[in-house]
Amino acid sequence: MNTREGDLIENTDGCIFDVKGLVHPPNKVVAFIRYVPDPEGNRERDGTRYSKFYSLSKRYALLKQKYPQYLVNDPVFNTLLCEVPLEDIKQHYRPAQGLQDLRNRNNLDDAELTALQFMEHLKENSGVQWSKLGVSGSILVNLHEASSDIDLIVYGSKTGYRVQAAMKEMLEDKNSPIKAYDLEGLKGLFDFRSKDTITSFEDFVRTDSRKVSHGKFRGRDFFIRFVKDLNEISEQYGSIIYKPKGRARIKATVVDDSESIFTPCSYKVANVKNIEGTKVEPIEEIVSFRGRFCEQARSGETVIAEGKLERVKQEGKHDHFRLLLGSKPSDHMILT
């Protein structure tokens, strides 16, 4: 199906899942439940009401209740994942197609119109092609509310870096309709994210106040997810095996942040010191499948990070270790 981060899928029961990552098992898609038909839900589409689930813990609990058969101890990633069989998928929502649909329609509501205007403004200032942009989230599946965020997808490395540079310029331009979060906006984002990612507000402000991937456009929150093009994805399911090796808290220097804007994101690190937990070496990278850890640190900066240690085994290459962030609320990455 060529599914990837930012896509959404709908199963035969009408439940909608968001696709995670770029690598999927044969005949399955790694995706986590997001919208569920519910007579008491506060969202509606085509006469059916839906509830939206945010936190990972609630999503796992719902999966155990409704779709325990989807929860798999994956032999490649060696962790519990939700894997939806292809035969259970009745609809595949692609962000690029979702954006094209918005451009072709005339009867857009305010959320849809603002999303389209944001992408028009971004395209004009970055010079990227329409085909490299997409709309995701609730707008893609027509389950948005009047106050819904704009979830934008940017495809490809070169396109991503161009958009990143354009966003930096626009956020510094006082006359631009694209605004960085002020302290009040950061507090709102912190209150939402701290429910399942524990950190101090001070540390949160130090990292998130300088990110170009989020902010406000004409008063509406936006989040940009940068995703690799399909022809840039070299990893195949099973070509790399990830083995859990406990948990650790480390101090390290970021030596390469070139993959930090993408989801999944990664940071090459050196001068690694173990502060707490399992001691292994060499730890060569810090990675995450969660967008909140993108743009978290820059090359040359020193960070303290806590997460799950994994041995990375790839034929023809030396084994190394990585620190994976995002599976527990205590996972974090802060600047020293």
Image (tube, rainbow, N blue to C red):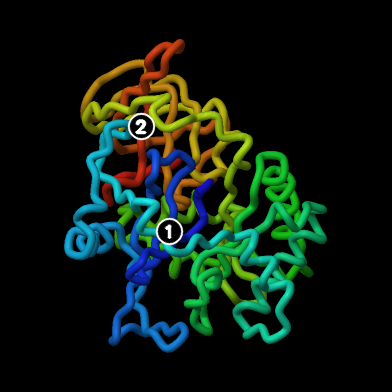
Q: Position of residue 230 (x, y in %)?
A: 60, 40
Q: Is residue 233 above or below residue 185?
A: above
Give the residue at x 39% y 61%.
Answer: 17
Closer to the observer: label 1 or label 2? 1
Q: Is residue 216 above or below residue 290?
A: below
Q: Position of residue 189 (x, y in %)?
A: 45, 65
Q: Position of residue 67 (x, y in %)?
A: 23, 60
For disc 2, the neighbor class at 10 Å (few under 14, some 14 to 19, many from 20) is: many
Mark 2 lies on a secondary structure that is: strand
The three-letter code of the residue at mark 2 reads Leu
- Residue receiving disc 2: 323
For disc 1, the neighbor class at 10 Å (few under 14, some 14 to 19, many from 20) is: many
- Residue receiving disc 1: 18
In the picture provided, is 160 more to the left or to the right than 54? right
* Quadrant assignment for the C terminus: top left
Mark 1 lies on a secondary structure that is: strand
| C-alpha distance separating marks 1 and 2 | 24 Å
Considering every residue shown, the one lying at the far front of the view is 87
Give the residue at x 22% y 25%.
Answer: 278
Q: Quadrant of residue 65?
A: bottom left
Work out whether residue 315 or residue 223 is closer to the camera in this orientation and state it.
315
Q: Earlier in the sequence, mark 1 or mark 2?
A: 1
Q: For the residues labelled 1 and 2, say whether their Cβ atoms are less than 8 Å apart.
A: no
Number of labels in the image equals 2
Asked if residue 181 can be seen in this view, the reply is no
Work out whether residue 44 or residue 272 is closer to the camera in this orientation and state it.
44
In the picture provided, is 266 more to the left or to the right than 310? right
Give the residue at x 49% y 64%.
Answer: 186
Asked if residue 328 can be seen in this view, the reply is yes
